[in-house]
């Protein structure tokens, strides 16, 4: 896993400043309040991942990068790996969804957890928690 430095080690005055510089924050209804929240007491935050396939996809990467930066700054990540959406599958161009068995979805969910664990540390002072 690549090492992600804390925003201070990277030379930024605040986590908000770093995330904005990296293009991970585009706009906010109240940037000052968001900056204060990010630089205040540790927050607990989550992002959901649907096990509709055996692997994460590129669309999950931005969320994982954001989660990793927040984690490196001391905030507490929760990765929510669902199940119900995996059972009914993603919609297809034909409009028909592929129904999946509980065993298939459970296997996919476990693979997603392992992949997420390659980006978000599973141990140490501030490990990712899975729900």
Image (tube, rainbow, N blue to C red):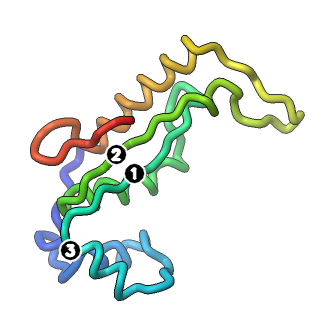
**Residue under label 1:** 46
Which quadrant would residue 92 be assigned to in this image? top right
What label does residue 88 carry, if any? none
Which quadrant would residue 94 be assigned to in this image? top right
**Residue under label 2:** 78
Q: Does residue 91 appear left or right of residue 7 in this picture? A: right
SS at circle 2: strand
* Category of crowding for the residue at label 3, using alpha-carbon neighbours closer than 10 angstroms: few (below 14), some (14–19), many (at least 20): few
Q: Earlier in the sequence, mark 2 or mark 3?
A: 3
- The residue located at (10%, 46%) in the rendering is 125
Q: Earlier in the sequence, mark 2 or mark 1?
A: 1
- Disc 3 to disc 1, C-alpha distance: 18 Å
* Vertical position of residue 114 compared to residue 8: above or below: above
Q: Does residue 55 appear left or right of residue 32 in this picture? A: right
- The residue located at (45%, 56%) in the rendering is 62
Whole-percent x and y of residue 14? 22, 79
SS at circle 1: strand
- Mark 2 vs 1: CB contact within 8 A: yes
* Vertical position of residue 71 compared to residue 99: above or below: below
- Seen as rendered, the residue at the extreme right is 94
Q: Which image quadrant: the N terminus?
A: top left
**Residue under label 3:** 40
- The residue located at (52%, 46%) in the rendering is 58
């Amino acid at each position: 896993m690549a090492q992600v430095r804390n925003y201070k080690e990277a030379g930024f005055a605040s986590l908000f400043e770093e995330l904005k510089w990296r293009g991970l924050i585009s706009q906010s209804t109240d940037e000052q309040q968001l900056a204060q929240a990010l630089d205040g007491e540790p927050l607990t935050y989550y992002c959901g991942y649907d096990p509709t396939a055996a692997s994460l996809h590129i669309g999950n990467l931005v969320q994982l990068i954001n989660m990793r930066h927040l984690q490196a700054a001391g905030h507490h990540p929760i990765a929510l790996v669902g199940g119900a959406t995996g059972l009914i599958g993603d919609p297809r161009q034909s409009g028909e969804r592929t129904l999946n068995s509980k065993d298939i979805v459970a296997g996919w969910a476990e693979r997603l957890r392992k992949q997420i664990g390659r980006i978000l540390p599973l141990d140490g002072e501030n490990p990712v928690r899975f729900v």
